Image (tube, helix red, strand yellow):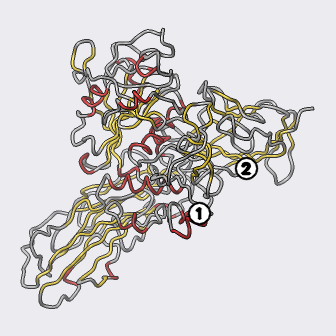
């Protein structure tokens, strides 16, 4: 979960059930179900609040957020914690591109008391709260402080209030009202709502529970090297014993990604350590989110996550009836999902022959095809062409490819019933959309005509051939500022309107006092230190919502800024060798260091530090850089 790598006794592992929690990739028993608070059913005063609705719950992957220890007066804090956690999630691929596949629900239950049990110590008060959340695995003195657990019965009872969701199409995340770092994950993920670092838990845990990704830690217990792996070839798709040459020769594991720059930094190759072993097993990247919170999924994990998210939904959301033959005197249609990161492909085929003139269209007018007398087979194949996937088997799976078929019989005649022109679904209009988003608008489907969606930007028509239901704003390369986008249907008075936010949030940095500052023409400012220094990143935006700040050193992977592990309000601290906190290492300038046995050799010399912002609309700001020169002392 959080690079904690807790060692649990075998007896505890044996007790794990389907309702268990996953903490750092290890199963631990969920707490017993009581589903009551102050003697009343936990659902008595619960309110379901839709945070993000992209479609019917039974056709979406649903993220259900529960709060514990937030009083009625503190419910605004719960909502602010949700905003922070979600915007970190939306800044992480592939959640950024597939955000439109996900509904988000908050279940608000005012707590009689504020806070959670045993926070931060075992002698801290127990709280009367709906979910009975507590550190130390629910106040177990034989556990560890940062293990934050939840009453699974109460969590299930509250999540069941969200109509259309089941254990098969949802992920529960319980946020405890605490600023202490902690969490757990799996079937029931938990995190302390007020700790900035905890917002990085959610994508990691969904990586476990949804993507079936394994931890890439090279230790089992914090501060203890994991030793040498002694098993056979791992079943995990992102661990191997094979060399790079063997992967290529056997076309195995991540051979398609070898040699590319990793999204989480460095180059995808063969990096030793993983599956709680220090040696003898290899992972794709030096660090990814499954090893170190704060980095991105690398391409290998990202591909698995795309498949996993897409498998929770159906690319084809609706289509013309196909239980009986249709005539050639009508239109046939498919409605698809609409990823934010790109359009889906639709290929129509008549008797196996691609209809190139109709490629991409969601509605096909059979009257224009000149179909010969007899019976024919018509199909529409919907495919996600995302570059995040390279494995043909994944591309061809039901997650990323769906086909709908009809029998066309020229002897059948269609009775045309008038269907008014109207929008049936669209990108939400109640908030700004980002300048790189794909915006969509679906329409009703008469059998005797095709309704065309006409798009306008700032009052000027926007050509959008092929698939007129989607408009890729990223292809328009919008100028900074705020724009007005509309969609209309010919013959209808209904017009959809969006505000397009094309101005990223502005970020800034503040450093501790350097020995000196050097300014050279044409180069970023250079700050000289001979020891530790701090960096605070701040951001501001002209639109509401939490802004995520990120930084990277010497072109390594982008790392989410969260303050400092022990204090979210403190600046990030860089040192020549890194700072050890709870047996993990943070802030080594130069080559990153995650655990105490990583190379601590100081990287003296000049380093480039870049920082950028990602706002609530998904706009990624231009990276700004400065130089830091670290001098050896003495």
Of pointers 1 and 2, the one earlier in the residue sequence: 1
Residue under the point 21% across and 62% down = 444
Residue 258, label in figure:
1
Q: Position of residue 139 (x, y in %)?
A: 43, 16
Please state which of residues 351 and 540 is positioned toward the viewer in this rendering: 351
Instruction: Decide if residue 554 is on the left or right side of residue 274.
Output: right
Residue for point 62% across, 30% down: 223
Mark in the foreground, 1 or 2 = 1
Quadrant for residue 104, please give it: top left
Residues packed near mark 1 inside 10 Å, few (<14), some (14 to 19) or many (20 plus): many
Q: CA distance from mark 1 to mark 2?
A: 21 Å
Q: Residue furthest right?
A: 634
Q: Nearer the viewer, residue 416 or 407?
A: 407
Residue furthest out toward the bottom: 372
In the drawing, does residue 284 fall left or right of residue 357?
Answer: right
| Quadrant in which the C terminus is drawn | top right
Residue 224 location (% of width, % of height): 61, 32
Residue 508 place in picture, x, y as percent: 67, 39
Name the residue that disc number 2 marks: 554
Q: Residue at x 48, y 41 (%)?
A: 204
Observer-nearest of 576 and 359:
576
Between 335 and 167, the one lying in front of the other is 167
Task: Answer above or below: position of 256 versus 339.
Answer: below
Residue 536 horizontal/vertical position (percent): 67, 33
Relative horizontal placement of residue 231, taking residue 126 as reference (left or right): right
SS of the residue at dot 2? loop
Q: In the structure shown, which secondary structural element does the residue marked by tag 1 occupy?
A: loop
**Residue at image point 31% right, 82% down:** 354
As drawn, 526 above or below 365 = above
State left or right for residue 585 relative to residue 204.
Answer: right
Q: Are marks 1 and 2 in contact (CB under 8 Å)?
A: no
């Amino acid at each position: 979960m959080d690079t904690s790598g807790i060692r649990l006794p075998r007896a505890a592992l044996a007790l794990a059930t389907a309702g268990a929690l996953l903490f750092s990739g290890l199963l631990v028993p969920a707490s017993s179900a009581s589903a009551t608070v102050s003697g009343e059913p936990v659902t008595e005063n619960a309110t379901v609040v839709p945070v993000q609705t992209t479609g019917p719950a039974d056709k979406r992957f649903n993220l259900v957020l529960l709060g514990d220890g937030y009083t009625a007066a503190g419910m605004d804090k719960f909502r602010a914690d949700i905003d922070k956690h979600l915007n970190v999630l939306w800044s992480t691929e592939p959640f950024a591109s597939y955000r439109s596949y996900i509904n988000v629900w908050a279940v608000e239950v005012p707590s009689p008391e504020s806070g959670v049990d045993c926070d931060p110590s075992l002698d801290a008060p127990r709280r009367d709260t709906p979910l009975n959340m507590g550190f130390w695995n629910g106040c177990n003195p034989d556990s560890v402080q940062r293990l934050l657990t939840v009453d699974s019965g109460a969590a299930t009872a509250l999540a069941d209030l969200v109509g259309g969701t089941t254990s098969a199409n949802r992920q529960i995340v319980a946020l405890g009202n605490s600023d202490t770092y902690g969490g757990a994950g799996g079937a029931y993920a938990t995190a302390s709502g007020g700790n900035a670092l905890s917002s990085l838990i959610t994508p990691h845990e969904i990586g476990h529970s949804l993507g079936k990704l394994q931890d890439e830690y090279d230790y089992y217990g914090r501060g203890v090297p994991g030793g040498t792996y002694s098993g056979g070839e791992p079943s995990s798709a992102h661990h191997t014993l094979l060399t790079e040459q063997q992967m290529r020769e056997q076309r195995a594991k991540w051979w398609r990604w070898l040699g590319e720059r990793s999204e989480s930094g460095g180059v995808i190759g063969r990096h030793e350590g993983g599956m709680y072993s220090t040696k003898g097993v290899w992972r794709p990247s030096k660090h990814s989110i499954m090893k170190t919170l704060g980095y991105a999924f690398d391409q290998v994990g990202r591909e698995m996550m795309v498949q996993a998210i897409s498998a929770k939904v159906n690319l084809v959301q609706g289509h013309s009836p196909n239980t009986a033959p249709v005539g050639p005197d009508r239109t046939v249609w498919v409605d698809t999902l609409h990823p934010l990161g790109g359009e889906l492909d639709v290929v129509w085929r008549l008797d196996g022959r691609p209809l190139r003139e109709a490629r991409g269209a969601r509605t096909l007018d059979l009257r224009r095809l000149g179909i010969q007398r007899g019976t024919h087979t018509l199909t529409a194949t919907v495919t996600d062409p995302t570059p995040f996937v390279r494995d043909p088997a994944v591309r061809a799976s039901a997650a990323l490819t769906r086909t709908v078929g009809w029998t066309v019989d020229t002897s059948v005649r269609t009775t045309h019933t008038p269907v008014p022109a109207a929008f049936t679904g669209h990108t939400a209009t109640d908030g700004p959309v980002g300048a790189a988003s794909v915006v969509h608008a679906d329409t009703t489907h008469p059998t005797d005509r095709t309704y065309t969606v006409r798009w306008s930007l700032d009052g000027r028509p926007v050509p959008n051939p092929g698939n007129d239901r989607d408009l890729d704003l990223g292809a328009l390369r919008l100028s900074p500022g705020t724009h007005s986008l509309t969609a209309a249907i010919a013959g209808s008075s209904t017009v959809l309107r969006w505000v397009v936010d094309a101005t990223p949030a502005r970020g800034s940095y503040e450093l501790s006092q350097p020995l000196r500052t050097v300014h050279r023409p044409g180069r970023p400012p250079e700050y000289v230190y001979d020891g530790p220094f701090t960096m605070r990143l701040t951001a501001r935006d002209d639109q509401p919502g939490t802004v995520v700040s990120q930084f990277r050193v010497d072109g390594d992977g982008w790392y989410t800024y969260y303050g400092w592990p022990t204090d979210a309000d403190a600046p990030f601290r860089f040192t020549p060798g890194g700072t050890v906190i709870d047996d993990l290492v943070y802030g080594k300038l130069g080559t990153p260091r995650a655990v105490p046995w990583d190379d601590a050799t100081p990287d003296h010399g000049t380093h480039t530090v870049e920082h950028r912002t990602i706002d609530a609309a998904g706009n990624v700001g231009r990276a700004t850089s400065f130089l830091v020169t670290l001098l050896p002392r003495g």
